[in-house]
Amino acid sequence: MRIAILDNDDDEFALIESILRPLGHDCRSFIRGSALQRELLRETFDLVVLDWHLPDTTGPDVARWARMTLKDRVPILLKAQGHEEEYIVDGLAAGADDIIVSPIRAGELAARVRALIRRAYAEEPDDQTWGRYHFLPARQLLEMDGAPVVLTQKQFNLALLLFRNMGRVLSRRYLLESVWGISSATDTEQVSRSLDTHISRVRTALRLRPETGYRLAAIYGQGYCFEAVSADASSLA
């Protein structure tokens, strides 16, 4: 999972990262709320951790902005400075999904992050079906209308990622990290064209068109969004 951490204390970020990275999470640090807001408008994160007091804003203000601005409801964990009821009430009212009180304790942070991810992204069964599409991840097999679809491993993984995140805008970097395992900026630029080729081949192989009930669209400046469309929308398209 990609986790954004907004905290102006380097030691605090290092502590949070040291707890979450061993759990398999990729952590990105931000010092100012404005920087995180800009990134959230173009990048995809699976969870956000917000400190309460920041140089240019507050954690609750960023949470409130996220709920009003972002299409996707990314889980938010807000760090409070004490157990006072006002922190809990204000934080949850601003849109945070959970509150953790400083100083951070490793076991508690890990447990709260696991709980938030479990609620937001329920564990997927081994075999999954969306309409005419039946995925069998253990066998790297996709069937469409009962017939197998020939895909490379990356095309299969890309297709499954899109279906599992239907309706969610996924940034190019998120897709490249999730399917290709690429995180460096240099490698991302080199493989970016390959992503577009794979998207095109998946769209063609699975016949992902509005007239068949699905739309796989490029979102300018961000990435791609895969969504189901209604019969009325399909006829208009």
Image: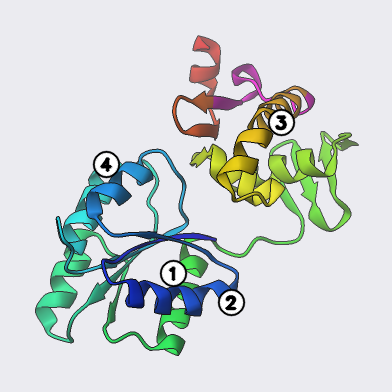
Between the C-alphas of marks 3 and 1, the distance is: 33 Å
User: Looking at this view, is 45 or 141 the one in front?
Assistant: 45
For label 1, the SS is helix
Between the C-alphas of marks 4 and 1, the distance is: 21 Å
Between the C-alphas of marks 2 and 1, the distance is: 17 Å
Task: Specify the amino acid type for callout 1.
Answer: Leu
For the magenta stretch, what is the residue range? Answer: 205-217
Whichever of labels 2 and 3 marks the residue nearer the N terminus, that label is 2
Q: Give the residue pinned by disc 2.
A: 22
Q: Position of residue 25 (x, y in %)?
A: 55, 66
Between label 2 and label 1, give the one nearer the viewer. 2
Query: What is the residue that sits farthest to the top in this orientation?
Result: 236
Q: Position of residue 215 (x, y in %)?
A: 58, 25
Q: Give the residue pinned by disc 3.
A: 194
Whichever of labels 4 and 1 marks the residue nearer the N terminus, that label is 4
Q: Does the magenta stretch include residue 207?
A: yes
Task: Specify the amino acid type for callout 2.
Answer: Pro
Whichever of labels 2 and 1 marks the residue nearer the N terminus, that label is 2
Could you say which disc has been placed on residue 116 in the image? 1
Task: Specify the amino acid type for callout 4.
Answer: Thr
Between label 4 and label 3, give the one nearer the viewer. 3
Q: Is residue 90 magenta?
A: no
Task: Specify the amino acid type for callout 3.
Answer: Ser
For label 4, the SS is helix
Between label 2 and label 4, give the one nearer the viewer. 2
Q: Give the residue pinned by disc 4.
A: 69
- Does the residue at mark 2 contact the one at mark 1 (Cβ under 8 Å)? no
